[in-house]
Image (tube, rainbow, N blue to C red):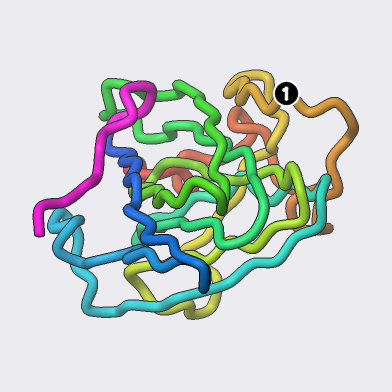
Amino acid sequence: MTSPAQPIDAIADVLYTPLRAFKDERGQFAETFRAEWFPQVSWAKFQTNRSDSVAGVLRGLHYHFHQVDYWVVTKGVIRVGLADLRPGSPTYQRAHTLELSADTPAGLFIPVGVAHGFYALTDCTLTYIVNNYYGDGSDERGVAWDDAALAVPWATSEPPVLSPRDIQNRRWADIPTAERPYER
């Protein structure tokens, strides 16, 4: 099957994947992922995760050195925030947001070095696939969700609910070079 993935012009290498949903009186079915859709990475270490959030929660921004993410919302609506932290990228330090909803099945491929997070517009469930097993946490870093230098356009009307870990995420300017993507 040919990949349904489409590039998002705002950030290089991020791919949006509209999914075909087949509906009838019983509900719906949608194929959500095939490794062959994303041949640019190895899927030898395949792990699936689930995140449940209440409305108003913001998770992120996180980035990885050795792991891509592929997100599918299975309940509710989220606003995804992205910031390109890869110095060699043509979209370096560009930010973008988009909405993913369970009502419009789609996947989002997020490459290594692109900071990502989401704001729960409703109670939601996010299922995501990564191409590396979780280890000791050394592959995951964070940058402040509201860093003015990155200017992710979250468009939140209320202050979001953050985890203690995400509250402690530093500003991009305060992150040492050794902890930045592709500058290690």
Residue farthest right in this picture = 158
- Residue 167 part of the magenta-drawn span: no
Residue at horizontal 81 percent and vertical 49 percent from the top = 55
Residue farthest left in this picture = 1
Whether residue 174 sits left or right of residue 15 in the image: it is right
Residue at horizontal 55 percent and vertical 71 percent from the top = 137
**Most prominent secondary structure in the magenta stretch?**
loop
Task: Categorize mark 1 by other alpha carbons within 10 Å: few (<14), some (14-19), many (20+).
Answer: few
**Does 181 sit above or below residue 135?**
above
Whether residue 110 sits left or right of residue 151 in the image: it is left
Q: Nearer the viewer, residue 162 or 50?
A: 50
**Does 55 sit above or below residue 155?**
below
Residue at horizontal 75 percent and vertical 60 percent from the top = 53
Where in the figure is residue 114, as x and y percent of width and height?
A: 42, 41
Q: Which residue is mark 1?
A: 155
Q: Nearer the viewer, residue 6 or 13?
A: 6
Q: Quadrant of the N terminus?
A: bottom left
Instruction: Find numbered disc 1 in the image and state the secondary structure of the residue it sits on.
Output: loop
**Amino acid type at image mark 1:** Ala
Residue at horizontal 37 percent and vertical 64 percent from the top = 30
Residues drawn in magenta: 1-12
Q: Nearer the viewer, residue 25 or 120?
A: 25
Where in the figure is residue 19, as x and y percent of width and height?
A: 34, 52
Where in the figure is residue 168, as x and y percent of width and height?
A: 78, 49
- Residue 7 part of the magenta-drawn span: yes
